[in-house]
């Protein structure tokens, strides 16, 4: 079993390995980010998925007897031939996201899961997965989509329905939503519709450049049903006090997203009485005028991207040692080894998955997001 303190570890398993981040500070709620990779790529999908599940179960027992999975995301290489198999074999009672974003290590499937100890959980009738601890209610949503005739209307209905789901739980989009993920089929053609719908809905909910937006990733990804152009995952919290949720901008490195017509925050952090959480949005090689830097240069873009993320973390008095999980998106699979070597050199101990996904601007070769947590004491707020 992992030690009762914040640690990062790699656990080798049969035909797989798991990267584990544990945050523990002598309170009831320990947090884990676990990334499971399959190493035997000669296995067929069913065998790889069984290997993945067996590895996950072994890790879960190894790290803690009462850790509860609250969110899982499966990354698939071919959703049309794999998605149903996942749903047939996945039995966890948590929010689940399944997306075609092929792991670039040659495997057919990979898993990221977020786990917490000491919480009470259940699925609400409206599909939100509720996680309760102390005075907070955490609400997770995965794989949400609506079939409409284009990406704009799909996004519009998704967000309108999500607003209603939040209202049913006593929340609002503006006050309680922490993080969204938009997975867009054929992003080069469908991203504009997502942006327009999101901008419009946000305006109706009081989210403007003068107030705040929501941290987010908008990235290429698809479902087995090709008519699903947009899928959304989301995370909200009920029970936060005023000033408990704040935003990071790194203005010397990047400009506000509203300056080039989109509506999301670069990053969001939340202070509890005993820890600080941070959620960094999809971040790429961009300057403070909104320009793409290092066109055609994967090493240059990766370095710039990491510097931008580092600046965002620094604004929250955090750094990469506080990161529990990183997800890296590459437009071109041929850049995999270059990027992997760069990450291994500096961030070897941070759980990370690198997948093939188109970024929202064709000139961007790479994008990343991350989630972190660190010890933090603020007696003004209740503990996590």
Image (cartoon, rainbow, N blue to C red):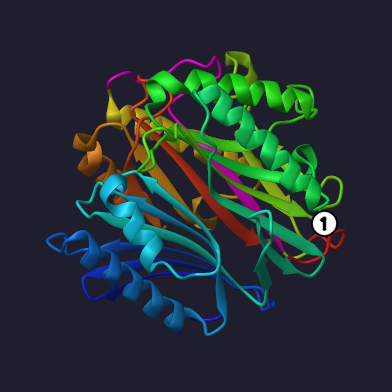
- Indicate yes or no whether the magenta region holds residue 308: no
Q: Report the number of numbered marks.
A: 1
Can residue 255 be seen here? no
Residue 128 position by quadrant = bottom right
Residue at coordinates 57% horizontally, 30% vertically from top-left?
155
In the rendered image, residue 24, in percent from the top left (x then y), is placed at: 60, 73
- Please name whichever residue, 227 or 128, is drawn nearer the observer in this view of the structure: 227
> To which residue does mark 1 refer?
239
Q: Is residue 67 left or right of residue 364?
A: right
Residue 27 versus residue 312 in the image, above or below? below
**Vertical placement of residue 78 versus 157, above or below:** below
Quarter the N terminus occupies: bottom left
Residue 19 left/right relative to 274: left
| Nearest the eye: 331 or 303 | 331
Q: Secondary structure at mark 1?
A: loop
The answer to whether 317 is drawn above or below residue 132 in the figure is: above
**Location of residue 218 in the rendering, given as x and y in whole percent from the top left corner:** 50, 33
Asked which quadrant contains residue 180, the reply is top right
- Residue 116 appears anywhere in the view: yes
Could you say where residue 236 lies in the image, as x and y percent from the top left?
69, 50
Residue at the image point whose x is 68% and y is 47% from the top: 269
| Label 1 crowd bin: few (<14), some (14–19), many (20+), radius 10 Å | some
Residue displayed at 22% across by 55% down: 107
Membership of 276 in magenta stretch: yes
Instruction: Give percent across and percent down for residue 40.
Output: 17, 64
* Magenta-highlighted residues: 275-296
79 to the left or right of 30: left
Q: Is residue 287 above or below residue 148?
A: above
Q: Identify the image quadrant of the C terminus.
A: bottom right
Residue, far left: 42
Q: Nearer the viewer, residue 260 or 69?
A: 69
């Amino acid at each position: 079993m992992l030690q009762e303190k914040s640690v990062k570890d790699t656990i080798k398993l049969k035909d797989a390995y798991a990267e584990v981040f544990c945050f523990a500070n002598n309170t009831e709620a320990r947090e884990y980010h676990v990334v499971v990779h399959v190493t035997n790529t000669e296995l067929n999908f069913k065998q790889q998925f069984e290997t993945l599940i067996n590895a996950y179960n072994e890790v879960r027992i190894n790290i803690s007897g009462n850790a509860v999975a609250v969110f899982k995301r499966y990354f698939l290489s071919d959703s049309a031939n794999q998605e149903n198999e996942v749903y047939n074999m996945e039995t966890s009672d948590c929010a689940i996201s399944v997306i075609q974003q092929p792991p670039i290590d040659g495997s057919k499937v990979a898993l990221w899961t977020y786990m917490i100890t000491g919480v009470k959980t259940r699925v609400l009738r409206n599909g939100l997965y509720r996680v309760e601890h102390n005075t907070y209610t955490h609400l997770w949503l995965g794989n949400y989509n609506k079939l409409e005739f284009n990406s704009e209307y799909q996004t519009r209905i998704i967000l309108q329905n999500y607003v209603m789901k939040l209202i049913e739980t006593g929340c609002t989009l503006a006050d309680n939503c922490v993080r969204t993920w938009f997975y867009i089929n054929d992003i080069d053609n469908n991203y504009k519709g997502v942006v327009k719908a999101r901008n419009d809905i946000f305006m109706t909910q009081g989210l403007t450049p003068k107030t705040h937006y929501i941290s987010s990733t908008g990235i290429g990804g698809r479902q087995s049903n090709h008519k699903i152009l947009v899928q959304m995952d989301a995370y909200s919290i009920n029970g936060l006090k005023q000033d408990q949720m704040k935003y990071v901008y790194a203005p010397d490195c990047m400009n506000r997203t509203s300056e080039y017509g989109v509506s999301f925050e670069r990053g969001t952090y939340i202070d509890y009485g005993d820890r600080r959480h941070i959620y960094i949005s999809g971040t790429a090689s961009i300057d403070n005028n909104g320009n793409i830097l290092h066109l055609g240069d994967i090493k240059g873009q990766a370095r710039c991207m990491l510097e931008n993320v580092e600046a965002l973390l620094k604004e929250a008095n955090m750094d990469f040692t506080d990161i529990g999980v990183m997800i890296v998106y590459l437009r071109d699979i041929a850049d995999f080894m270059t990027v992997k070597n760069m990450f291994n050199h500096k961030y070897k101990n941070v759980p990370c998955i690198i997948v093939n996904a188109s970024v929202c601007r064709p000139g961007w070769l790479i994008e990343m997001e991350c989630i972190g947590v660190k010890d933090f004491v603020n007696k003004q707020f209740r503990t996590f």
